[in-house]
Amino acid sequence: MTHRLGSLCDEHYPPPRSIQQSAHVKSMEEYRLLYEESISQPEKFWKKLAENLYFKDPPGSGEDFLNYNFDANAGPISIQWMRTSSTNICYNALDYNVEKGLGDKVAFYWEGNHPNDEASITYQALLEEVCKFSNVLLKLGVKKGDKVAICLPMVVELVIAMLACTRIGAIHSIVFGGFSAGSLAERITDAKCTIIITADGVWRGKKLIHLKAIVDDAIERCVKAGFPVNQCVVLKHLPRVTSAVDVGVGNDISQVGWKQDRDLWWHDIMKDASPKCPVEWINGEDPLFMLFTSGSTGKPKGVMHTLAGYMLYSWATFKYSFDYQEDDVFWCTADIGWITGHTYVTYGPLLNGSTSVLFEGVPYYPDPGRFWAVIDKYKVSKFYTSPTAIRTLMKHGEAEVRKYSRSSLKILATVGEPINPEAWHWYNHVVGEDRCPIVDTFWQTETGGHVITPLPGATVTKPGSATFPFFGVVPAILDDNGAELSGECEGFLVFKKPWPGIMRTVYGDHERFERTYFRKFPGYYCTGDGARRDKDGYIWVTGRIDDMLNVSGHLLSTAEVESALVEDPCVAEAAAVAHPHPIKGECLYCFVTPVDGIPYTDKLEKELRDKVREKIGPFAVPDYLQYAPSLPKTRSGKIMRRILRKIAQSDPDLGDTSTLADESIVVLLQKNRVATA
Ligand code: WT7
């Protein structure tokens, strides 16, 4: 087949015969039958799948199996799956697999940031470490229902810490190590964690990140805000990595700030812990974990997932979307600090008894061939990464890829943002040599697992389309008035029914949960994304339609960035808009109005970039800042970001400008537009 870029909508890629033959779902007819059943008889469908997992008290029937209200006009939104069941996700991920004879199977190959650094751990060994850490947590006074903050690099101890929480019924709240102290503090206090687990530091590429220093700063901020974090467990990671040994840092404790009555070394408290720990049987609808995601207004939301539904859904999506087979070596490159890592580094793979790679590094260190080197080293068969990583590596050319055999690869998957056809083709043709199905999985922190995705043995794919709904998911596309569109159409992407993995609430703010996802279109869960349906029924997610943007697969709200900018005493007003970026997908273009009498200078620009880095994190730093003597507003004073987006993209067609209070500012901003890549 030859590939032509350009008008691609009608290009079709059927599943390769080799994948299809042994796949769990082998054809579209088979998919449709299963899908129909999952919608018309959800209890029957999901109960059969639940038989693959262990429940101490069974999933239940009727309303006990599934009970929900999706209609904000009919009362409070509530979603319950298997509410009278009891189970434990750690038991299912570890004990149950060991009992089935997988004790000696490798659970994770750990590949460090430096190619010299590697380790592996079996299911049996992981179980023992998890039990030890569960005992440690119990000894520190952590009880069922308590919240534990975790801020660790991509090391096996991160998986150990999260599983230990779930074993004893504690709720983990994992915060990505790339956040600033301020963002970290905000998340720890909002989640009401009193204990945090972290590490001395970590290398990311050539850069050393002093994690403990960031955490110390964050804890101080929590305490100042009247919120006591009185225990901090610290993993000594640096002394065991090559980069630290090479430059002689890591062993010197004086480099790690230490608070005697608060800080504990991981290795000290683990030393005498018993490798056996009983499982706490937990109700199916009890909280499992929370994970923060950006909100289009105000502070980040603590997305709450509960036990039984999330467990079943992460097991099922891993098995079907990646067509899991026993001899697979699976690699998801996402950090566990994001939902992708929760569901497809930790829970999905372990619940299926799979062997996976846990990667600490970055795609371009020590060189841009690293991904393919790791794939060859561990004979990775299923690979899951982001469009932004693909675009970064594309830039370095095909030769970097062709140096490696990649012959073990069977399926290539992506997540995080719409994949542009050019990147899709490169992934398919250069990386996969046209023999691996491309699985473009659409989902969100809120959905728990894939909601729109091809099944690799069944679905005929089209480059750039996430294709069809996963089992139990009923998508619809709505117009501005909330009417369902049929046939070929474009509008708001919503879901009509709950699937087991959907979030249950925003932690501590159920009202916000209802307002954010269910009030705009009563009766539907609103994703915040736009989508198009083509003549063959394929769904094409087109991107966010709210004031959110997606930088390298990380969601950010423009409000979050604006509030960081206006915190600077020199800034009167600021407006941030999403702007297309060749590698990151989207980046930030910000318009800044200084306070009267303050000049707009390079120094101010640098200060503002530092401010955003410090307030939110490095990934949020704006690519472009433009001086704005004032901002285009409606007569009622609302900033018209729609117009600012067009100005940033030098699109002369501004659309309807009749509500603008003052048109002259638009002309001025157009004239002084900053050149973009
Ligand atoms: C937003 C969710 C869930 C994993 C990572 C991000 C965008 C995600 C796709 C895809 C088009 C996608 C959407 C979504 N998104 N995957 N395959 N095609 N868009 O999780 O931070 O909760 O972000 O990412 O805009 O709403 P998240």
Image (spheres, helix red, strand yellow):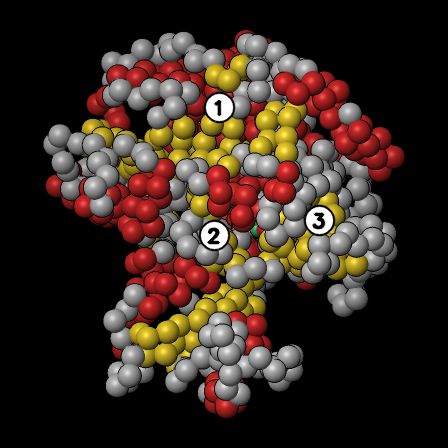
Q: Which residue is mark 2?
A: 295
Q: Is mark 1 within 8 Å of ligand 1?
A: no
Residue 47 % position (x, y)? 70, 19
Q: Is residue 525 left or right of residue 486?
A: left
Sequence-wise, the earlier of marks 3 and 1 is 1
Q: Is residue 127 left or right of residue 70?
A: left
Q: Is mark 3 within 8 Å of ligand 1?
A: yes
Sequence-wise, the earlier of marks 2 and 3 is 2
Q: Is residue 327 left or right of residue 550?
A: right
Task: Give SS at disc 3.
Answer: loop
Please give the name of the residue rendered at 38% of the width and 20% of the height, measured from the top-left corner: 144
Q: Is residue 153 left or right of residue 257?
A: right
Near-viewer residue (62 or 385): 62
Q: Could you classify mark 2 by the number of other residues whose Cα lies within 10 Å: few (under 14), some (14-19), or many (20 or more)?
A: many
Q: Amino acid at mark 1?
A: Asp
- Between disc 3 and disc 1, the foreground one is 1
Q: Could you classify mark 1 by the number of other residues whose Cα lies within 10 Å: few (under 14), some (14-19), or many (20 or more)?
A: some
For residue 310, the mark is none
Q: Mark 1 and mark 3 in contact (Cβ < 8 Å)? A: no
Q: Amino acid at mark 2?
A: Gly
Quadrant position of residue 424:
bottom right
Q: Which residue is mark 3?
A: 466
Q: Which residue is mark 1?
A: 286
Task: Give SS at disc 1.
Answer: loop
Task: Give SS at disc 2.
Answer: loop
Quadrant holding the N terminus: bottom right
Residue 152 % position (x, y)? 35, 38
The answer to whether residue 434 is seen in the rendering is no
Please give the name of the residue rendered at 30% of the width and 65% of the height, measured from the top-left corner: 567
